[in-house]
Amino acid sequence: MRLLFLAPLLTGLISFYICRKSQDELAYVTAVVAGVSLLASLILAPWQVQFLLLILGLSTIAYFWKQQDTENTLEVQQFQATVQTKVNMMKGQKPAEVVPSSIAVSPKEVTDKRKVRKYRGVLMVETPSQPANTPSNLKYRGANVRDNNSNG
């Protein structure tokens, strides 16, 4: 195996280093030199090295392609669940994933008496709030609050 391809590779790596450290036009010139020398070293490389780079490139592309495909699948499933939830809400039904299985009541009773919501993965049941009983002798800085509100 000839090691001639290492000369342009080393030249490319050194010029890339200079490109990262320099500014203005010198950076552009060294970037072009780095690109051309790396391309030349790839062309001059033995077939074993080229084959190894090809395998590495294809496996990397396949990994990212598979990862992107699973992300798209999850996004589609979440979108379909959201659409189904909105359709059910338009029909007046409660979404299936929000109502826990421990509540065995009809949807009408659920909407009338309590609201079941999902917040950060935790099911929360809201009961209708009732007005608080305020004491009759409620005072603020010595003044009776109930008397001030009714007189004012």
Image (cartoon, rainbow, N blue to C red):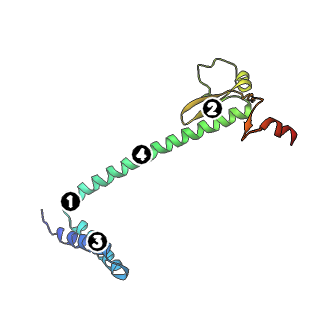
The amino acid at mark 1 is: Trp
Numbered badge on residue 25: none
Q: Nearer the viewer, mark 1 or mark 2?
A: 2
Horizontally, residue 102 falls left or right of residue 111, namely left
Who is closer to the viewer here, 147 or 96? 147
Identify the residue at image location x=36%, y=47%: 63
Q: Which residue is mark 4?
A: 67
C-alpha distance separating marks 3 and 2? 56 Å
Asked which secondary structure carries label 4, the reply is helix
Asked which secondary structure carries label 2, the reply is strand
C-alpha distance separating marks 3 and 4? 31 Å
Q: Nearer the viewer, mark 3 or mark 2?
A: 2
Q: At which x and y percent is residue 137?
A: 76, 31
Instruction: State which quarter of the image contains the C terminus.
Output: top right
- Most extreme residue toward the left is 1
Q: At which x and y percent is residue 90?
A: 73, 35
Q: Give whichever of discs 2 and 4 has the lower sequence position.
A: 4
Asked which secondary structure carries label 1, the reply is helix
Q: Give whichever of discs 3 and 2 has the lower sequence position.
A: 3
Q: Which residue is mark 2?
A: 117
The amino acid at mark 2 is: Arg
Q: Give whichever of discs 1 and 4 has the lower sequence position.
A: 1
Q: Which residue is mark 1?
A: 47
The amino acid at mark 3 is: Phe
C-alpha distance separating marks 2 and 4? 31 Å
